[in-house]
Amino acid sequence: MTGATSVGRQAEVAEYAAAVRAALTDVPADRCEELLEDLEDHLAEVAADGDAPLEFRLGSPRHYADELRTAAGLPVAPPAEDDQVGLTELVTRLRSWAPVRQVEAFLPELRPAWWVVRAWAAVTAVDVVFVGGTSFPVPTLGLGPVGLLITGAAIAWSVRLGLQARAEGREPGRHAALVNAGLGLLTLVALVGLADGPGVATAERVYVEDAQPDHLVHEDGTPITNILPFSSTGEPLTGVLLYDQDGRPIDGLADVTVDGESVETVPDAPLQPGNAYPQQRQVLSWDQYGEETAVPMPLPSIAPSAGIEPSTGIEPSTGVAPSAGVTPEPGPAVPGETPGTGPGAPPTP
Amino acid sequence: MDTTQLLKGVLDLAVLAVLDGEDGYGYDVVRRLRAGGLEEVGDASVYGTLRRLYAAGHLTSYVVPSAEGPHRKYYGLNVSGRAQLEIATKTWQGFADTMAALLTTDPEVAA
């Protein structure tokens, strides 16, 4: 021995010994005393052998106590202190549990997915909060294709950020953790918004239906259930084929009158193209016995009439009535189509 | 191979053997074991082993006042300790022979 133990070292020994005893509080007192009777003296010998601190030479008191347990044949498991396990300790224990360790090991593999999700969540949350409803799965901010582009750009940017961070080997700092937590919150907002989604989506669909009817209508919304062509002289025409500017056949007569009655093409009418007018239509109604009755819709009289008015009782209003000033082209101007070759019913003379 | 794992099984024998030559106090036993080649032996392991062997009645102990530092508790083998050492030695030698045989015959078996 190279000299007496200094006062400072005595304090160090006492402190270390106390910590070792504290780690062995689950051991019965008499057994513990039998084991640790001269622990302080022993540690003082160790301390006197060098200048290095005891913790450096012997490890932590906790570790020393564990080693002591094994050597002395004490139960290894330290179940004590369970009642005062701190949150940190709990997390540490949880993370040492094998399944948790395995999940933790592959979580980094999921990072790219998170980069996509966080961008999606941010845009969706904006959609939900500021636009008041979102489209699933890709939020459009109510801007249609532009919104899709914005979402795509947000995802690209987010993934780029993630790749950059990974390339630089940066561990996410406190700042990044805060941002990620915020985005996690936005993900929640987005999901809640989606859960409310069906109502929003239905309203949207109704709106679309109103804006784009699937049948012919007037500007005021009155359904067009038939088209009755007349010549400039007031003669009703039949088998007139109608096309739009692109040569697309104009068909799609309304199946419901403005009064809500069902209208259909007479089933046994002579076959003619869907854009040949007028068509033989009939209004369906039901009598008090539930029997279906079909009432043919009046057509202009076939016979040429001298007057402007067709004899059917259907009066083309004066504005609509063909006047001398308006000279319709003799044949249908149909680019790219040859309606004359169609199987249309020939106009009855 | 992890020598600390091997050490756990033979530490009793090693401590008994060290004390058979000459009585010693705790840290003295640690140093003699390390000097003898068991460099990785832990202080707590030796101290715990000494205390257990003592509690089991294999060791005598007596305090020697030290002029330089604390009193030193010396340990030595009693009759029970010597018997224990004898048994443990035989066990170890039998085990070591078995292992040696395994390790030397194994290549021939493979060949």
Image (spheres, rainbow, N blue to C red):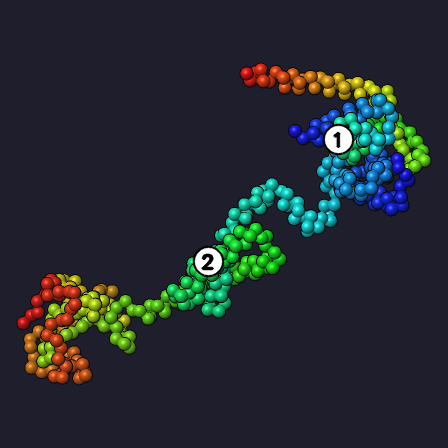
**Residue B111 drawn above or below residue A312:** above
Residue A275 location in percent, x, y? 17, 67
Residue A321: image location, x then y, percent: 15, 81
Marks 1, 2 in one chain: no
Q: Identify which residue is drawn at 94% across, 33% down.
A: B65
* Relative side of B111 to A305, left or right: right
Q: Amino acid at mark 1?
A: Glu
- SS class of the residue under badge 2? helix
User: Relative to A87, is B28 on the left or the right?
Assistant: right
- In this rendering, the answer to whether A67 lies above or below A163 is above
Residue A51 position (above or below residue A302): above
Q: Chain of mark 2?
A: A
Q: Measure the alpha-carbon separation of dots 1 and 2.
A: 58 Å
Decide which of A139, A305 is in the foreground and name it.
A139
Binning the other alpha carbons within 10 Å of mark 2 as few (below 14), some (14 to 19) or many (20 upward) gives some
Q: Quadrant of residue B58?
A: top right
Tell me what residue is drawn at x 78 percent, y 26 percent.
B36
Residue A3: x percent and y percent? 90, 39
Going by the image, does A138 lie left or right of A40?
Answer: left
Of tags 1 and 2, the one toward the viewer is 1
- Dot 2 amino acid type: Ala
> Which residue is rendered at x = 59% and y = 54% of the image?
A172
Query: Residue under circle 1?
Result: B39
Is residue A281 visible in the rendered image? The answer is no
CB-based contact (under 8 Å), mark 1 and mark 2: no
Task: Where is residue A156? Give x, y as percent.
Answer: 46, 58
- Is residue A134 rendered to the left or right of residue A102? left
Residue under label 2: A156
Which quadrant of the view contains residue A309?
bottom left
As helix, strand or loop, the secondary structure at mark 1 comes to loop
The label number, if any, that marks residue A177 in the structure image: none
Rendering quarter of residue A276: bottom left
